[in-house]
Image: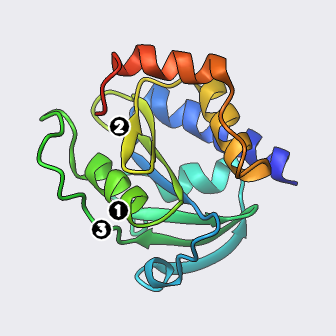
């Protein structure tokens, strides 16, 4: 079931990236996100590419804010996330990215971001933003976080991430 969820997230991410549709998806891990879920609209739907794409259609009631995903279910949409207070971020990062980083500073969640301006795919984790990811990178990072939450990300992926970051925290 979780592999099907990863495929659905990957497909939706690919389509939204190509079409420059902004998205913010929070993947709950050990830290419960009830406080964030309460700020949104309850969904409790099976994760599917179509559902995720529909939620993030611009100028629709649920497109602003984040979806929270628990296991293979979209628990809620239109959820409010805390913004990071880090002032040393690139000026090209907007509110969506700042919310992803802020959420990752306050929980162990993985937060997937698709930029509305560029289509760039990023993941926030532990207060850091991994940018310029491919759909395959996303699947591997999420698979590791969900299936092997205490395992380290594969060395090859870590090397790729470091090269994308230029060795710096973004």
Vertical arrangement, residue 77 with respect to residue 37, above or below: above
Circle 2 is placed at which residue position?
115
Circle 3 is placed at which residue position?
82
Residue at 27% x, 33% y is 117
* Horizontal arrangement in the rendering, residue 140 relative to residue 60 (left or right): right
Vertical arrangement, residue 115 with respect to residue 70, above or below: above
Q: Residues within 10 Å of mark 3 (few under 14, many from 20)?
A: some
Q: Which disc is residue 28 wearing?
A: none
Q: x%, y% of residue 108?
A: 53, 60
Q: Residues within 10 Å of mark 2 (few under 14, many from 20)?
A: many
In this orientation, which residue lies closer to the viewer: 136 or 46?
A: 136
> How is the protein colored in the picture?
rainbow
Residue 137 occupies quadrant? top right
Circle 1 is placed at which residue position?
64
Q: Secondary structure at mark 1?
A: loop
Q: x%, y% of residue 56?
A: 46, 53
Q: Earlier in the sequence, mark 2 or mark 1?
A: 1
Q: x%, y% of residue 57?
A: 44, 51
Q: x%, y% of residue 145?
A: 67, 48
């Amino acid at each position: 079931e979780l592999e099907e969820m990863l495929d659905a997230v990957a497909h939706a991410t690919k389509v939204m990236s190509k079409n420059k549709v902004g998205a913010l998806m929070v993947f709950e891990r050990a830290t419960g996100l009830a406080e964030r879920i309460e700020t949104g609209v309850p969904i409790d739907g099976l994760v599917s590419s179509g559902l995720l794409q529909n939620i993030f259609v611009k100028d629709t009631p649920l497109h602003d804010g984040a979806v929270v995903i628990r296991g293979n279910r979209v628990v809620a949409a239109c959820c409010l996330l805390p913004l990071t207070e880090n002032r040393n971020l690139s000026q090209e990062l907007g509110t969506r990215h700042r919310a992803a980083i802020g959420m990752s500073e306050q929980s162990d969640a993985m937060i997937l971001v698709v930029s509305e301006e560029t289509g760039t795919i990023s993941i926030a984790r532990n207060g850091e933003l991994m940018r310029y990811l491919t759909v395959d990178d996303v699947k591997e990072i999420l698979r590791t976080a969900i299936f092997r939450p205490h395992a380290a990300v594969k060395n090859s992926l870590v090397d790729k991430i470091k090269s994308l970051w230029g060795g710096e925290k973004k």
